[in-house]
Amino acid sequence: MSDIKSLDDLKSVVGEAPVAEVAIAREPVRDTLGRSYATGKRKDAVARVWIKPGSGKVSVNGKPMDEYFARPVLQMILRQPFKVANVEGQFDVMATVAGGGLSGQAGAVKHGISKALQLYEPSLRAALKAAGFLTRDSRVVERKKYGKAKARRSFQFSKR
């Protein structure tokens, strides 16, 4: 064995190993109408989302976003992917959502918008992925167990 005491010694023995840069060239995925489609999920809600270039109009189940998601927090959740990708007001969104409550539905639409944006414009993928918007939030409500009041809560103990 040779006397290798540092990384520089190791480099001289092995030589410069070429680093293989493998970049996946992603193609935009669009239909004949110039739209991108994605499915978003959160809790029990499932959202089908279509995006196309436009003025920033968002409709959910045939209603404007302000009408369907009346709470400002839910509207903010829907706008997050556009802010992260710096494309606010450039895409129209048409979404149909079913199942769950309003919070889960807003999360599902956000997930769908993020996936559709990265399919429409693959260069936006890095920003959306870094923000964590492309990952499905798999947390769901824990089921109720028998002998318990809820999933983990026990019935009130009575001494007498």
Image (cartoon, rainbow, N blue to C red):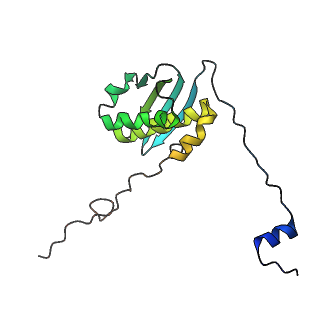
Answer left or right for 9 relative to 45: right
The C terminus appears in which quarter of the rendering?
Answer: bottom left
Answer left or right for 68 relative to 134: left
Above-or-below relation of 38 to 140? above
Quadrant in which residue 34 is drawn: top right
| Frontmost residue, 92 versus 19 | 19
- Residue 50 visible in the displayed image: yes
* Image coordinates for residue 10, horizontal then vertical, percent: 81, 71
| Frontmost residue, 19 versus 94 | 19
Quadrant in which residue 75 is drawn: top left
* Image coordinates for residue 98, horizontal then vertical, percent: 42, 34
| Frontmost residue, 1 versus 116 | 1
The residue that appears at 35% across and 37% down in the rendered structure is 74
* Image coordinates for residue 23, horizontal then vertical, percent: 73, 44
The residue that appears at 76% across and 71% down in the rendered structure is 7
The residue that appears at 33% across and 38% down in the rendered structure is 73
Above-or-below relation of 66 to 130? above
The residue that appears at 43% across and 25% down in the rendered structure is 58
Answer left or right for 44 relative to 134: left
The N terminus appears in which quarter of the rendering?
Answer: bottom right
